[in-house]
Amino acid sequence: MSIKLEHVNYIYSPGTAYEKKALSDICLEIPHGEFVGIIGHTGSGKSTLTQHLNGLIRATSGTVWYNGENIYGEGYDMKKLRGQVGLVFQYPEHQLFEVDVLTDVCFGPKNQGLSPKECEQRAAQALRLVGLKEKYWKSSPFELSGGQKRRAAIAGVLAMRPGVLVLDEPTAGLDPKGRDEILDQIAYLHRQSDMTVILVSHSMEDIAKYADRIIVMNKGQILYNDTPKQVFSHYQELEKIGLAAPQVTYIMHDIREAGFDVGVTATTVEEA
Ligand code: ADP
């Protein structure tokens, strides 16, 4: 499930007064099973980049490879790719629309043509993975709390059994407790499976906690793409562009790297 971007450029509304170059010469390789953090300010190109990963938008120039296949090649199965690279958008709860949570989570597998029984099995497994208690499965998605809605929306993507899970600011708008719970749950999911996880955030604190590798985006370009340790060594440069986290974040990361589980809360194993 490796992903490779080769010299990807993306321009919104080319040839109009609104023309905007959002990505410049992005070259990037994400091997299978990695936990990658993508960080950058609003407008740095993070969302545009992630939408290239499952073919939702097509590069103006350059190539995207998935498992060694050019996704822009003739006859490439984009529908299959969208099932393989699951994208959880910002405020994903806006996409919850079915009568109850279980039916909502069944939506993706149903679209993949699976039988109702298989869909329910997949949905139940996904809901357990995200830690949403069974008593909520027959509730309307609108009756859930903010954090529970996020979990339900993430389950909807997981039910398609993607090889790659891309989360665009999954904690936006949640309070600090809800934010930590969701991030811990994502880290737990990653540990439980061999799924590649790509977490987009504008917070170095969130990214530093979990990522094996950090990609720093700035003005549509990749500024750094390295291990957290290497990226943190550019503290002064990160500070200049307002992306440096407090020193304690980096120390916590080092403690984790040394094998100590510091901050994974009880909610990781308990259900919400
Ligand atoms: P980020 O996710 O880091 O906030 P985006 O990928 O959303 O960044 O945006 C990158 C740049 O592209 C920004 O300058 C943004 O204003 C511009 N942009 C994003 N979406 C559109 C769009 N639909 N039309 C025109 N410009 C856009």
Image (cartoon, helix red, strand yellow):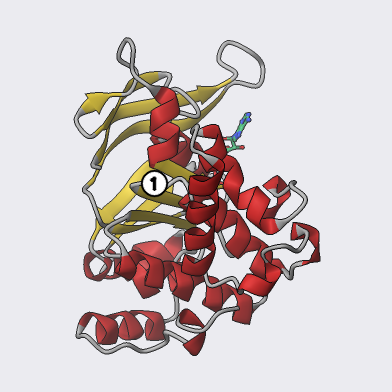
Residue 38 appears left or right of 67: right
Q: Is residue 146 visible?
A: yes
Residue 243 appears left or right of 175: left
Q: Mark 1 points at which residue?
A: 162
Whole-percent x and y of residue 84? 38, 39
Binning the other alpha carbons within 10 Å of mark 1 as few (below 14), some (14 to 19) or many (20 upward) gives many
Whole-percent x and y of residue 229? 23, 71
Q: In this view, does 112 lie above or below 143?
A: above
Disc tally is: 1
Quadrant in which the C terminus is drawn = bottom right
Q: Which of 98 and 199 lies nearest the eye of the viewer?
A: 98
Q: In this view, does 178 lie above or below 75?
A: below
Question: Which quadrant contains ligand 1?
Answer: top right
Q: Which of 85 and 179 lies nearest the eye of the viewer?
A: 85
Quadrant in which the N terminus is drawn = top left
Q: Which of 227 and 158 lies nearest the eye of the viewer?
A: 158
Q: Is residue 228 above or below residue 114?
A: below
- The quarter of the picture where residue 254 lies is bottom left
Q: In this view, does 162 lie above or below 36?
A: above
- Residue located 66% across and 50% down the image: 103
Residue 130 appears left or right of 135: left
Whole-percent x and y of residue 265? 47, 87
The kind of residue on which mark 1 rests is Pro
Secondary structure state at the residue bearing disc 1: loop
- Residue located 27% across and 64% down the image: 212
